[in-house]
Image: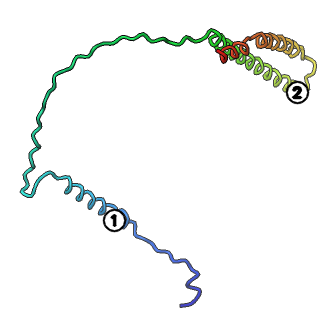
Amino acid sequence: MSVENFNTPVTRTTPRWVIPTAIGVVSLFIGVLIGASGSSADASGVATPAPAVTVTSKPVETVKEVTKEVEVAKVPQACLDALNDADALQQISGEMANEVATHLQADGRLFNQFAEFDFENTQWYLDGQNAFNASIGSLTDRVTSNTYGTNAAACRAA
């Protein structure tokens, strides 16, 4: 045998029918084993009867009802106020996001206008910028006047 034979890969081809046939034979064998082990017949071929079951009953005991007053903890008002303030801040945050999105769209429109070398009609943008500044100023005032910090600290102290 020469060295050249060791360097060439050996390829073996298996006929297409061998693997499905092997799987089928193994599956059939496993099925026969399961079927033979699951049979409830004894050696004579007659199924064995199920064992007799006896049912016994006990007298029912009466249950005595007991009522007990339970004190339910009340949520401090500072905590409820802090939750309301947090809800308000979340609302303000959504409004601010909408304002910024609208402003960014206007920025894109202005950019496209400048890309077409139209520098004359920009008053719409300045008007929009003034409205944006007023809206953001109003939202900022609402944020700074919110009492969440004070109520949250009072809630944590309670």
- Give the camera-side residue of 122 and 53: 53
Q: Quadrant of the C terminus?
A: top right
- The correct choice, above or below, for 52 with respect to 10 in the image is above
Number of marks: 2
- Give the camera-side residue of 41 and 58: 58
User: In the picture, residue 110 is in which quadrant?
Assistant: top right
Q: Is residue 94 left or right of residue 70?
A: right
Whole-number angstrom distance, CA of label 2 to CA of label 1: 74 Å
Residue sitting at 91 percent across and 23 percent down?
Answer: 118
Residue sitting at 9 percent across and 49 percent down?
Answer: 48
The residue under label 1 is: 22
Residue 64 placement (x, y as % from top left): 28, 14
Residue 18 placement (x, y as % from top left): 36, 67
Residue 154 placement (x, y as % from top left): 68, 14
In the image, which disc is placed on residue 47? none
| Amino acid, disc 1 | Ala
Residue 116 placement (x, y as % from top left): 88, 27
In the image, which disc is placed on residue 116? 2
Label 2 element class: loop
